[in-house]
Amino acid sequence: MTIHAMNSNLSVPEQPAQRILECEKVNVFYGDYRAVTDVNMAFGQNEITALIGPSGCGKSTLLRSLNRMNDLIDGARTEGLVTLHGENLYDKEVDPIAVRRRIGMVFQKPNPFPKSIYDNIAYGPRVLGMKPSSMDDLVEETLTRAALWDEVKDKLKQSAFGLSGGQQQRLCIARTIAVQPEIILMDEPCSALDPIATSRIEDLMRELREDYTIVIVTHNMQQAARVADRTAFFTALQDETTGNRTGVLVEYDKTTKIFEDPSDQRTEDYISGRFG
């Protein structure tokens, strides 16, 4: 059976009431290798969407295509449409740096800058020429929103590397929201954290959903079930044109539907631990 025939079995989910970001027939290539094939999905405003699936199914590749991070990889290219409020983010007139300001990214491992806690937050606004009435107030507000202010307010001039792993990840989230994005992408943000730090990040995601749209890649099924409004399950199938494995979207729906009554047997097998 071809990839396209397999994709034709997708369930038809209830669409987000307010679509902010949409993918239409998105394919992502690394050179001649097609890593993601024909992804169609819409992300709802002020919702958390989880991308799940086995390793090598294209979740992180798709995530990076949403804010043009793949542009930084030699030989990578994206085909199809990725639109934010209907604007094609891959239009030649669109500045990829501006895209990454509007759609921020938090990575798998905390990556604070080799600067003070204060300067980690202030760096983005300064580089972008933002002129808040008070940088001190912006730093405090941002760290407060990231549930970190009370823990660091007396050591803002100290190196960010002195923080614990969980604190560093919350600092990276604070650094992301300091430039006032609309969407936050998170690529397995808790995989390197202990359960307590993970719980704090999950609580933070729920709070941030009030003001941001969040897309998260996770291998933790329980995490997806706890925090996501919608969940998309990906897997890897053989591309009959090249013989290589390529990532495809199997099923995308409300999280309760995906976990309690999936429409595709492969989804049920994956979330129940029978493969992947």
Image (cartoon, rainbow, N blue to C red):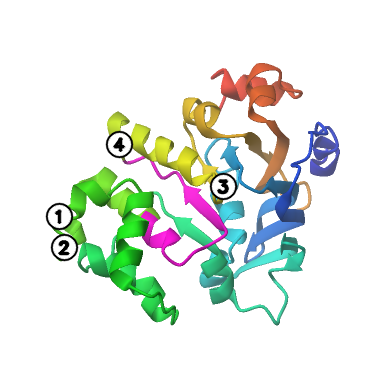
**Disc assigned to residue 197:** 4
- Pointer 2 residue: 159
Image coordinates of residue 100 in percent, x first then y, are 53, 68
Q: Which quadrant is the N terminus positioned in? A: top right
Task: Give the image quarter of residue 6.
Answer: top right
The answer to whether 29 appears left or right of 142 in the picture is: right
Residues rendered magenta in the picture:
174-192
User: What amino acid is at disc 1?
Assistant: Gly
Instruction: Judge whether 200 appears above or below 117 on screen.
Output: above
The answer to whether 260 appears left or right of 157 in the picture is: right
Secondary structure of the residue carrying numbered label 1: helix
**Looking at this view, is 214 or 148 the one in front?**
148
| Crowdedness near tag 1: few (<14), some (14–19) or many (≥20) residues, C-alpha within 10 Å | few
Q: Is residue 180 magenta?
A: yes
- Pointer 3 residue: 215
**Identity of the residue drawn at 64% across and 35% down:** 230
User: What amino acid is at disc 4?
Assistant: Ala
| Crowdedness near tag 4: few (<14), some (14–19) or many (≥20) residues, C-alpha within 10 Å | some
